[in-house]
Image (cartoon, helix red, strand yellow):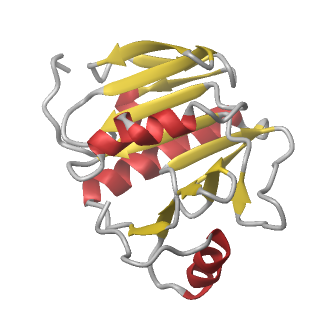
Amino acid sequence: MAEAALKHISAEEYFAMEETAFEKSEYYHGEIFAMSGASIHHNLIVANTIIAVGNALKDSCFVFPSDIKVELDPGHHYAYPDISLVCGDIAFGQGRNDIITNPKVIIEVLSESTRNYDRGNKFAAYRQIQSLSDYILIDQYRVLAEHFTCKSRDNWELKICRSAKDILVLDSVGISLALKDVYKNIPLETEDTE
């Protein structure tokens, strides 16, 4: 994240600003944080993952890129995950058609500037979303995926994948995601030899 605005603003002011802004910003308790541009690797991983997930899901869920906001705390916290999946009907924030409230799976691609936030405060906020069953962090600098699965709101199980041969299994949506597909066309060092 970049830097916070100095003035405390309301969620309504944030929504109005977002409608005319050239750049996306996340909102956290009255502060706005501009989202910086992403690297080529980041964008390729997001695109590869959306394609792989979309092909596996067929029509059973909706797959959203980072242009859809997720409500983490009504009126207080809104974020743009790299990828969100919603299964069943889409639930929108009150009076909004650009904010979802019921993601089933959230995927974030880590960068140097966001990795601590994605693992820390942002994940803590995501864990409060009742519909969320899976949270996946994908490293853009090496083959590494951390898959957190919700067992209860206070109990999340972690599986780590470190090889392009590894498969992420998302039981909650009935698909598998091969890391070789996620990292397709990205020349990264891996722990395996292919």
Q: Which of the two residues, 47 or 86, is positioned nearer the viewer here? A: 86
**Quarter of the view holding residue 65:** bottom right
Q: Residue at x 53, y 39 (%)?
A: 125
Image vertical order of residue 113 relative to residue 178, above or below: below
Quadrant placement of the C terminus: top left
Q: Position of residue 17 (x, y in %)?
A: 57, 83
- Image quarter (top left, top right, bottom left or bottom right) of the N terminus: bottom left
- Residue 42 drawn at (x, y percent): 32, 52
**In the image shown, does 62 or 6 lie closer to the viewer?**
6
Q: Is the residue 137 above or below the residue 115 in the image?
A: above
Nearer to the camera, 145 or 77: 77
Could you say where residue 35 lies in the image, as x and y percent from the top left?
Answer: 38, 66
The residue furthest bottom is 20
Residue beneath the point at 25% across and 30% down = 143
> How many numbered marks have been drawn onto this rendered protein structure?
0
Question: Where is 127 relative to 161, above or below?
Answer: below
Q: Is residue 88 left or right of residue 189?
A: right
Q: Residue 56, position in %: x, y?
A: 63, 32
Image position of 147 (left or right of 75) = left
Is residue 94 left or right of 189 when viewed as pictured? right
Q: Residue at x 44, y 45 (%)?
A: 48
Q: Residue at x 38, y 28 (%)?
A: 179
